[in-house]
Amino acid sequence: MKSSSLKIGLALFLVLVIVPLVFRSSSYSMTVLINAAILGFMSLGVWLTFSIGRINISQGAFGLIGGYITAILASRFGVPFWLCILASGVGAALLGALIGLPILRLRGVYFSMLTLSLTEATRLVALTATGVTGGASGILNIPTPFQGENSYLELYLFAAVLLILGTLAVWRITNTRLGRVFRALQQDEALASSFGVNVSAYRVLAFSLCCGFGGVGGSMLTMFVQSIYPTSFTVTDSTNFMLYCFLGGLGSVFGPALGALVLFLGFQLLAPLGAYQTLAYAAIMILAMLVLPNGLLSLRLPKRTHALEKANVS
């Protein structure tokens, strides 16, 4: 327990103190880290739906919804960002509950394909509802509280704290009765129902929480770039949120954050390959899945004590 607390403390010190000190002078590095933190936060919601046995490929849709809520409230009504981000999270969560009630009856590939279609449908609605969303032209010049010389640093710290709080919240959920119910649904919904669990209500709750994470993340990214378009979140983004969870590891709540950092940073590092960037990215991703089917967090360094024991035996 003491060792775990020390590791967590060192990780927090690295994220909140060392990283800003090292990279604060590079706007490009800070941009990459800001994006990685926000994408990791959004992936936490997808991880929650994995915990009830659903493969969700619609997080991009709720990121887009949250982004448009923030863009409309901030640019047209002058609502402060702090209220915009709250409204985006709550709005996306409520919409997720309404949509989730009928579609969560499906399982397996049927649910996955429906959520995939939901992402594309949301993009098309944003494209055609020109009176609300601005259509293909989007919404530009969205006001942001992060301005001035230290804007990148401030936004990074906000995104990092948001990711930390989100991870702690999901970790807390997994260690309560609610988390145990979610895991029961993942194992056998019929058995859980026989013990008096309201399966439909808990499924909708998990999906709604996921959508809320997506809405908040979409709000953050929209405020960061100060613009939003129907293509700001696509099917590719929804797929990436799922991949972040897979690469980091579904067995730990820290998996989404690690997966988002490694994949997003890795994609940026492959930029010199030009037209072959995506091909190389896909090849590395496939290789990683083959070598580490349980994610990066399944890696375990050999302990020194084991090495000493072997030496003594010999």
Image (tube, rainbow, N blue to C red):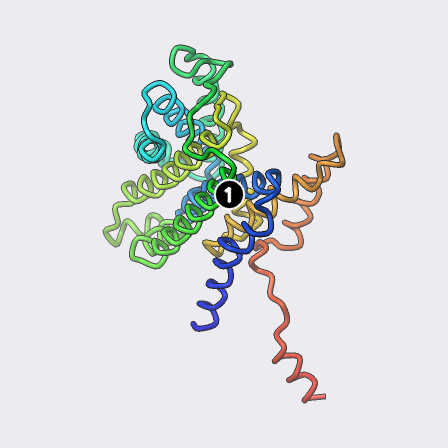
> 260 or 119: which is nearer to us?
260
The residue that disc 1 covers is 153
Work out whether 312 lies above or below 55.
below
- Density class for disc 1 (Cα within 10 Å; few <14, some 14-19, many ≥20) is many
Residue 140 % position (x, y): 47, 19
Residue at horizontal 36 percent and vertical 37 percent from the top: 212
Residue at the limit of the structure toward the top, as seen here: 131
* Count of residue discs: 1
Q: Which quadrant would the N terminus be assigned to in this image?
A: bottom left
Q: Amino acid at mark 1?
A: Leu
Q: Quadrant of residue 296?
A: bottom right
> 309 or 293: which is nearer to us?
309
Residue at the limit of the structure toward the front, as seen here: 149
Residue at horizontal 72 percent and vertical 88 percent from the top: 314
Work out whether 312 lies above or below 145.
below
Q: Quadrant of residue 73?
A: top left
Residue at horizontal 50 percent and vertical 44 percent from the top: 37
Report whether 205 appears left or right of 56. Answer: left
Work out whether 139 lies above or below 211.
above
Residue at horizontal 57 percent and vertical 42 percent from the top: 30
